[in-house]
Image: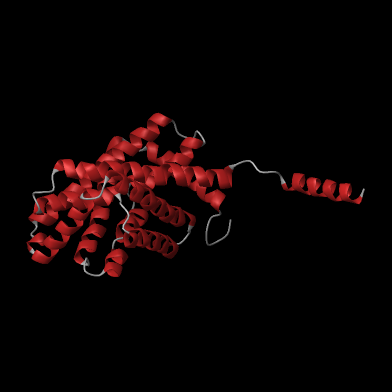
C-alpha cells in the first residue's frame, strides 16, 4: 500500500467490501441511491445533447454523471457489475447479488425517466436544436441491430468498470475524477452503448419523435443491459480475479525451485 493508490489486490478487496455494503442496504436506501444515479447519468447525457455538434466536447461533458456518483454516492447498474468479485469469493450469495443488481437497474430507470419528464415539461426541448439532436441520437440507437448493441455494450462497460476500478484505487479526489473522466470519455467517443444512459436518450427521443416506440426502445435496452453485464460483470471481474487473486507460488518456493535448477545444471 502507498499514499497515492491501492494495489490491484487491495483494489479488489475494496470492491468486495463495497459489495458487502451494497447488499446490506435496505430497499429504500438502494432505491434512493439508484434513482439519484439514474438522474446523474441523465445530467451527463443532457450535456452530451447540448454539445452534440462537437464530438470531443460532448464526450468530455458526459462523464460528469459517473463523477457525481463516485463523489456524492449512488448505485449504478453498470458500475455495480463489479460486485461479481464478491460473488466469486463467496462474500455475498447469488440471491443478494441478483436482487441488488435488478433493483438498482429498476431505480436507475426511474431516475432516468424522471429526468426526461422534468427536462421535457420544463421546456428545455422547446429549443429546436436540442430537440433535433435528441431525436438523432435516439434514432441512431434504435436502428442498431441486437448484436451491434450487445457488442458495443460489452466494450462500454469494460471501460466504465475500469473507471470505477481506478476511482476505487485512487485515494484522492483528483485521481477519482480523472479515472472516471478519461475512461468514460473514451467509450462515448467510440460510440459504445451504455444501458442507463440509453434509459434517458431513448424515452426522450420518443417524447420528441413518435416513431420511436416502446418496442424499439426495448430492442436497444435489452442487448445493452446484457452486453454491459458481460463486459463489467463477467469479463473484468473474472480476468482480474484470475490475474491478481489466483494462488501463486510463494517467493521462498520460487527461490528453492531456482536453486534446484542451478544445482542440477552444475551437476
Would you say 6 lies left or right of 144 here?
Answer: right
Would you say 259 lies left or right of 97 here?
Answer: right
Colour setting: secondary structure
Residue for point 30% across, 69% down: 56
Residue for point 30% across, 42% down: 223
Residue for point 75% across, 47% down: 254
- Can residue 180 be seen at all in this image of the molecule? yes
Q: Is residue 76 above or below residue 90?
A: below
Number of labelled discs? 0
Could you tell me residue 188's position as x and y percent? 32, 60
The N terminus: image quadrant: bottom right
Seen from this angle, which residue lies furthest right? 267
Q: Quadrant of residue 65?
A: bottom left
Would you say 235 lies left or right of 70 here?
Answer: right
- Can residue 13 be seen at all in this image of the molecule? no
Front one among 178 and 223: 223
Residue for point 39% across, 52% down: 155
Could you tell me residue 57's position as x and y percent? 28, 69
Would you say 82 lies left or right of 46 here?
Answer: right
Front one among 116 and 189: 189
Q: Quadrant of residue 30?
A: top left
Q: Quadrant of residue 95?
A: top left
Could you tell me residue 240's position as x and y percent? 52, 47
Could you tell me residue 120's position as x and y percent? 10, 55
Amino acid at each position: 500500500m502507498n499514499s497515492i493508490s491501492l494495489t490491484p489486490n487491495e483494489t479488489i478487496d475494496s470492491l468486495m467490501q463495497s459489495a458487502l455494503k451494497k447488499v446490506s442496504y435496505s430497499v429504500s436506501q438502494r432505491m434512493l441511491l439508484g434513482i439519484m444515479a439514474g438522474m446523474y447519468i441523465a445530467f451527463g447525457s443532457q450535456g452530451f445533447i447540448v454539445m452534440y455538434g462537437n464530438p470531443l466536447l460532448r464526450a468530455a461533458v458526459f462523464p460528469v454523471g459517473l463523477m457525481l456518483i463516485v463523489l456524492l454516492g449512488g448505485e449504478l447498474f453498470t458500475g455495480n457489475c463489479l460486485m461479481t468479485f464478491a460473488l466469486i469469493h463467496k462474500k455475498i450469495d447469488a440471491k443478494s447479488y441478483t436482487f441488488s443488481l435488478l433493483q438498482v437497474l429498476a431505480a436507475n430507470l426511474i431516475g432516468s425517466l424522471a429526468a426526461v419528464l422534468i427536462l421535457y415539461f420544463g421546456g428545455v426541448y422547446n429549443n429546436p436544436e436540442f430537440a433535433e439532436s435528441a431525436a438523432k441520437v435516439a434514432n441512431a440507437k434504435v436502428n442498431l441491430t441486437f448484436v451491434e448493441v450487445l457488442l458495443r455494450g460489452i466494450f462500454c462497460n469494460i471501460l466504465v468498470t475500469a473507471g470505477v476500478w481506478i476511482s476505487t484505487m485512487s485515494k484522492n479526489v483528483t485521481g477519482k475524477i480523472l479515472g472516471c473522466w478519461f475512461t468514460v470519455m473514451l467509450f462515448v467517443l467510440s460510440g459504445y452503448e451504455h444501458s442507463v444512459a440509453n434509459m434517458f436518450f431513448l424515452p426522450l427521443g420518443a417524447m420528441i419523435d413518435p416513431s420511436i416506440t416502446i418496442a424499439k426502445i426495448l430492442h436497444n435496452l435489452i442487448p445493452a443491459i446484457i452486453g454491459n453485464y458481460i463486459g463489467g460483470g463477467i469479463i473484468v471481474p473474472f480476468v482480474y480475479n484470475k490475474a491478481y487473486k489466483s494462488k501463486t507460488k510463494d517467493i521462498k518456493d520460487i527461490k528453492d525451485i531456482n536453486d534446484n535448477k542451478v544445482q542440477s545444471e552444475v551437476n
